[in-house]
Image (cartoon, coloured by chain):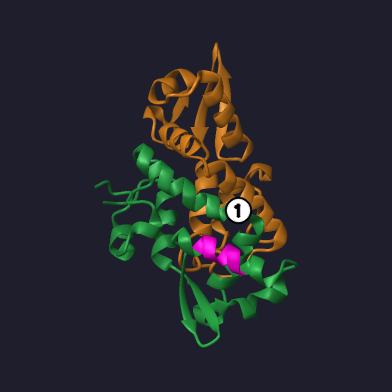
Chain colours: A orange, B green
Amino acid sequence: MSKKLLPLADATDLADDAACSTSLVAEPLTESEAAGLAAVFKALADPVRLRLFSLVASHAGGEACVCDLAASFDVTQPTISHHLKVLREAGLLDSERRGTWIYYRARPEALAQLSVLLAPQAAAA
Amino acid sequence: MSKKLLPLADATDLADDAACSTSLVAEPLTESEAAGLAAVFKALADPVRLRLFSLVASHAGGEACVCDLAASFDVTQPTISHHLKVLREAGLLDSERRGTWIYYRARPEALAQLSVLLAPQAAAA
């Protein structure tokens, strides 16, 4: 299996895997890696989703529910829920239902993997 | 001006700027930052473009022309040229015409900025 293990959503132990990911500067992506990674970037390629992702990731306690987020956007709560679902399906957010609300948090291992992948030099082995 | 200076294509001195970029985990993106950054991720959200970008970035000498790339893809040379243009307009590639060919290279400052932005922790000040 390639060191670049994508798509993010399919990997169950990305924390370890991220440590051995390599930059796309180091070696060309395979077709399958590119397909998985493009899906992740597609999830990030929308301004509202990107702000949502950033708001969740930077929220106090590292997590947020739709109730915390809706006030920051001009879109409806169902639209926000839809965008959060897209981010979760791309492997960028985890979610947990507690009572009435679903709480979302960024997956640091997914961010770490993307960060290494886009690093301008190859990460040390 | 925010530390997150986007879109990448508008910045002329990203090398310095990247050093003081912060992760989107550290503070929420503004609407304008999110719009600029979403455009960059959109450029990366296509499997062929992503492979092209990776091929250029990892190519011997750090640069490649369409003549170097066409053999790796099932799409036509004009299609490859179009994708390279999209990547250039997003600020991810630089280009230089030499003789018949345009040579492309990845912009390490753009990669550095994206890498810091997606880092799971805030970069040190």
Q: Position of residue A119 (x, y in %)?
A: 47, 62
- Going 39% across and 30% down the picture, which residue do you hit? A59
- Going 50% across and 59% down the picture, which residue do you hit? A118
Q: Quadrant of the N terminus of chain A?
A: bottom right
User: In the drawing, does residue A58 fall left or right of residue A91?
Assistant: left
Q: Nearer the viewer, residue A19 or B75?
A: B75
Q: Is residue A59 magenta?
A: no
Q: Give the quadrant of residue A57.
A: top left
Q: Nearer the viewer, residue B115 or B31?
A: B31
Q: Position of residue B93 (x, y in %)?
A: 47, 67
Q: Give the quadrant of residue A67.
A: top left
Q: Position of residue B70 (x, y in %)?
A: 68, 74
Count of picture labels: 1
Q: Nearer the viewer, residue B67 or B4?
A: B67
Q: Is residue B86 magenta?
A: yes
**Residue reaching furthest right?**
B74
Is residue A82 positioned above or below A99 on the image? below
Judge whether residue B86 can be spotted in this image: yes
The residue wearing badge 1 is A17
For disc 1, the neighbor class at 10 Å (few under 14, some 14 to 19, many from 20) is some
| Region of the chain picked out in magenta, as a range | B81-87
**Residue reaching furthest top?**
A100
